[in-house]
């Protein structure tokens, strides 16, 4: 599972420190930042289950940053044709 967060982490050194802390605290998570994205994205993948958003938000808050889960924009494609 992958969870995507909007953050206010704007500097590479801060992002590296956060990623290191995530990897130390959650060995099953793989994390990375996209600081070039307008939302300063943090992506976390859990190789053995689900990502706990509350734990990640709490970790960022403890480091003086904010994070919120970005909603999944996936929308099923409507059926264009129906059989009669």
Image: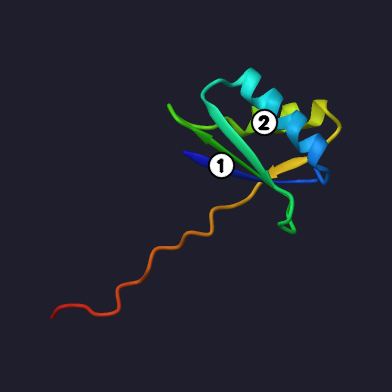
* Residue at image coords 55%, 20%: 27
Between 67 and 22, the residue placed more toward the observer is: 22
Report the side of 72 relative to 76 (left or right). Answer: right
Report the side of 57 relative to 71 (left or right). Answer: right
- Relative image position of residue 76 (x, y in whole percent): 39, 63
* Residue at image coords 48%, 32%: 50
Between 48 and 57, the residue placed more toward the observer is: 48
- Relative image position of residue 15 (x, y in whole percent): 76, 37
Q: Quadrant of residue 44?
A: top right
- Relative image position of residue 32 (x, y in whole percent): 64, 40
Q: Quadrant of the C terminus?
A: bottom left
Q: Is residue 80 above or below residue 41?
A: below
Mark sitting earlier along the chain (1/2)? 1
SS under mark 1 = strand
- Do the CB atoms of the residues marked 1 and 2 lie less than 8 Å apart? yes
Say how many tags the image has: 2
In the drawing, what numbered circle is on residue 3? Answer: 1
Using the numbered discs, state the Cα–Cα distance from disc 1 to disc 2 in whole angstroms. 10 Å
Q: Is residue 56 above or below residue 66?
A: above
- Relative image position of residue 75 (x, y in whole percent): 45, 63
SS under mark 2 = helix
* Residue at image coords 77%, 29%: 17
Location of mark 2 (residue)? 56
Q: Is residue 10 above or below residue 1?
A: below
In the drawing, what numbered circle is on residue 20? Answer: none
């Amino acid at each position: 599972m992958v969870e995507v967060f909007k953050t206010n982490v704007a500097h590479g050194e801060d992002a590296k420190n956060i990623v290191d802390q995530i990897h130390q605290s959650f060995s099953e998570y793989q994390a990375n930042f996209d600081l070039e994205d307008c939302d300063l994205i943090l992506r976390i993948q859990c190789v053995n289950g689900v990502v706990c958003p509350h734990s990640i938000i709490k970790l960022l808050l403890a480091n003086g940053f904010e994070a919120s889960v970005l909603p999944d924009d996936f929308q099923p494609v409507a059926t264009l044709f129906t059989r009669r």
